[in-house]
Image (cartoon, coloured by chain):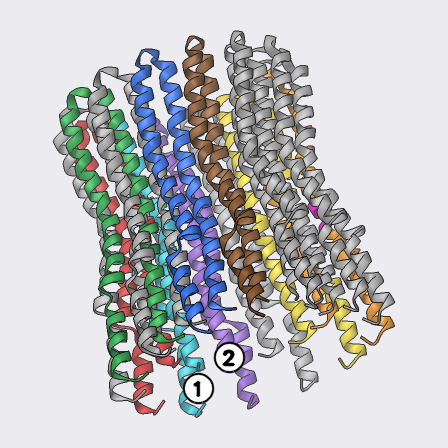
Chain colours: D orange, E yellow, G purple, H cyan, I red, K brown, L green, M blue
């Protein structure tokens, strides 16, 4: 098992794990916020615009944590500095 | 166990894991939001269109985290940069 | 343990795992949404059609995450690119 | 431990695991939906037919995720492409 | 540890695991549905027959997931295709 | 560690595990159903016979999943086809 | 580590595990049923005999799953067919 | 590590585990039943004797599962048939 | 690692584990019973003596499961039959 | 790794584990009882002395399980019979 | 497996893990705060600005813990002092 | 890995583990008691002194379990009898 | 695997773990406090300033535990005394 | 892997673990107490000073368990007696 294979394997596994576990919290949190928003609109239809605005700001805030995870996964797959360094090392040396 | 086999095995396992665990959070979150929407419509039928619109925007937002997972799984299966690099290395060298 | 066996074993295990764990979230989420829909119809029978429509759209949305899992499992069993590549390698070389 | 044994062992284990874990979510979800349906019928007996119809559609939808798991388990036991490929390889070659 | 022993051991373990874990979900789901049915009958005795009928259909639906597990366990013990194939291989070859 | 010992050890362990874990779900489910039945009888004493009948049918249904587990455990201990096959193999061959 | 030691060790461990884990579900389920019975008697003292009878039938039903576990544990310790077979084998052969 | 040491170690570990885990369920179940009994007596002091009697029968029933565990643990420590058999074997043979 | 060391290590570990895990259930159960007793006394001060008596009997019953664990732990540390047997064996033989 | 080191390491680890896990249950149980006592005093200030007395007896009862754990941990650190026996053995023999 | 590969693999894995698990808590906490804010606005629309301001300050406070995680992950990927030190060591020495 | 290193490593790990896990229960229990105390004071301000006194006695009681853990951790770090014994052994003998 | 690599790997992993798990508790606790604050402001708008002040003090108190974790993670990455000592040892000796 | 590296690695890992897990309980407990305090102030604004005082004493009490963890982590990093002893041993001897 060469060094390159180790790094590739770990990067692949981590990318998937990151985006999968990173989806659990935001999805549950957004579900809760959205559910309460719907309940609130039904209870006080006149405050609909205020509630919608607050909901969307909150959803964006919560979504941000999911996006952090997605960004890290993308970096690990397509712009992984450790992989690049290892590739260079493998090219210059006969490994 | 060659390097190619390691990378393939990890990619397969991670793709399945990602999409399976990535489905738990969104499904539960959407279930909660939808349940509350139905309860809200029953409570205030006049606000139905507003509630439906808010529900669908929320569902789309929550679904996005599931789609991140699906996208990562598809990338790992069909456009895996590590697999491509390993295949090239295996072809140029006698492995 | 040849490379082919590793990839086959991992594919089989991942396919089952994916579809099994991918069924937990959607089933619970759909159960919740359906339960609330039934409760809402009993509370406001006049809004039945609206509630049914909203329920079925929501169920379809939630079911989609289960279908992602089923699709990935089917790809892993019947259209696995890693398995095909490994089979070709095994045929061209004496392994 | 030959390759055939590995694939057989993994297939057996995965088939059982898939159908066992795939039964948890749907059973709980169906239990919840059915419980609420019974409660709704008691609360509003006049809406019985509508409630029954909605319940059965929902149960079918939830059951589908359990059936995905059963289908995958049956494929793994009786129509496993990896096992067939491994059997052929074992016959053609002296292994 | 011969191949036959591996397959036998895995089959035995999986059969027990499948039926044990496959019993948790249905038992809990049926308990919930039955509990709510009893509560509903007490609340609305006149709707007894309707409630009983709905309960039994639901119990049958939920029980089906437990039966899938029992079927798979029985197949693994008494009609295991991998075991049969391995037995034949062991007889034809001196292994 | 001979093959016979492996199969015996796995059979013993699985039998115990199956009956132990298989008891958790049914016991909890039956406890819930019985609890609600007692509450329902107290609330509506006139519906006692109907409630008792419904309770006993439900308990029998739930108990069935525990009995599946007990049956599988007994088969594994006293009528284990893999053990019989292994005993025969051990007798015919000097192993 | 001889075969006899393996089988003895596994039997001991499984017997303890079975009776320990098999006690969790029934104890919780019986606790729930008994708690509700006490609450029901307090609420409707006139239905005391009916409630007591229903409670005892339910407790017996739930206790049965604990007794399955106890029976399996006793079989494993005092009437273990695998141990007997292994003892005979050890006596006839010098192993 | 001789056979005697293995059997002794497993027996010690299992005895402790059995009595420790076997205490969790009954303790929680008894706590629940007792709590509800106290609440019921406060609510309906006139039914005190009936409630006390029902409580003590229930506690005895729940305690029985803890006693099964204690009995098994005592058997494993002081009347372990496997240990006795192993001791005899060790004495007759020089092992 | 001699046999004596194994038995000593397992005994120490099991004694601690037994008393630690055996404390969780009783402590929680007693906490629940005591909490409800306090609530009941506040609700019905006239029934104080009856409630106290019932509480103390229940606490004693629940405490018994913790005492089983403590007894087993003390036996394992100070009156361990396996340790005594192993010590004798080590003295008679040169080990 | 000499026998002395094994016994010392296990004793240290077990002592910490015992007191740490043994603190969880009692702390939660005492928190619950205390919380309810405060609520009860606020609801019925006249019953304050009775409530305080009942609370302190209950807290002492619950604390006893934590003290069992502390006692076992202290025995394992400062009066460990296995350690003493092992030290003697190490002194008499050259080990 | 060279030192460089170890450090790279651990850094990749830790970065993903950090940002994934670090997203669970904040997302759930923000979901809860936002849900309650929406409920509060519906209940008291006049206090909307105060509620929004308090909500946004709270969200920022909670988000800060997610940002700690993101910062640590970025440091581990792009400014890892251990990786830099290891690279220098690898360059100066022939390793 | 010398004996000294093993004992040191285990002591360090156990000290941290003990104080970390030992903090979970007391913190949650104290949080619950304090929360209820605040609620009780708001409900019955006149009983403030009694409530405060009861709260502080309870907090001290609960804190005691955390202090047991802290004491054990400190003993393991600064007054570890096994470490002292091992140091002496290492000095007298050349090990 | 040299000593330097071990220390670097453990430091990286621990830093990520610390900040990730250390974010869960504070985020949930702050979410709960903020949610209740919003609910309290809606219920009693006149007490807004008092509530805000109490909320911010509480949030700062809770945040402090997250900051402990962040500080430890930063120390482990940028001011790790063990790493410095190991680097010095590696420089002075040829290792 | 020298003894020094083991002790350093364990110390680093334990320090992080201690402060991370030690933050979960206090943060949740403080969140609960603060939430209830805010609710209590809104319900009874006149008792504000008493409630604030009680809250701050309680928060300090709960925070103390987090500080125990922080202190232990700091001792492990900056004043570790085992590390000092190991360093001295390594200096006096040639290791």
Q: Is E47 in front, or is L35?
A: L35
Identified at 26% across, 80% down, the residue is L91
Q: Is D82 in front, or is G80?
A: D82
Identified at 73% across, 67% down, the residue is E83
Residue I34: x %, y % from top left: 25, 39
E36 lies left or right of H37:
right
Residue E79: x %, y % from top left: 73, 61
Q: Chain of mark 2?
A: G
Q: Quadrant of residue G52?
A: top left
Q: CA distance from mark 1 to mark 2?
A: 11 Å
Check contact, mark 1 vs mark 2: CB within 8 A: yes
Q: Is residue M39 above or below residue I64?
A: above
Q: Quadrant of residue M56?
A: top left
Q: What residue is pinned by disc 2? A: G4
Q: Secondary structure at mark 2?
A: helix
Residue G19: x %, y % from top left: 43, 59
Label 2 neighbour load within 10 Å: few <14, some 14-19, many 20+: many
Quarter of the image with the C terminus of chain D in it: bottom right
Q: Chain of mark 1?
A: H
Q: What residue is pinned by disc 1? A: H89
Label 1 neighbour load within 10 Å: few <14, some 14-19, many 20+: few
Q: Is residue D71 found inside the magenta-colored segment of the image?
A: yes
Judged by its main secondary structure, the magenta piece is helix
Identified at 16% across, 24% down, the residue is L47
The boundaries of the magenta stretch are: D68-73
Q: Is residue K72 above or below residue K56?
A: below
């Amino acid at each position: 098992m060469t060094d390159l294979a180790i790094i590739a394997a770990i990067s692949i596994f981590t990318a998937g794990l990151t985006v999968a576990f990173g989806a659990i919290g935001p999805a549950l949190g957004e579900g809760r916020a959205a559910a309460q928003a719907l309940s609130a609109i039904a209870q006080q239809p006149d405050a609909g615009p205020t509630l919608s605005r607050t909901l969307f700001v909150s959803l964006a805030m919560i979504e941000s944590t999911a996006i952090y995870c997605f960004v890290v996964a993308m970096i690990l797959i397509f712009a992984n500095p450790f992989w690049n360094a290892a590739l260079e090392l493998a090219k210059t040396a006969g490994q």
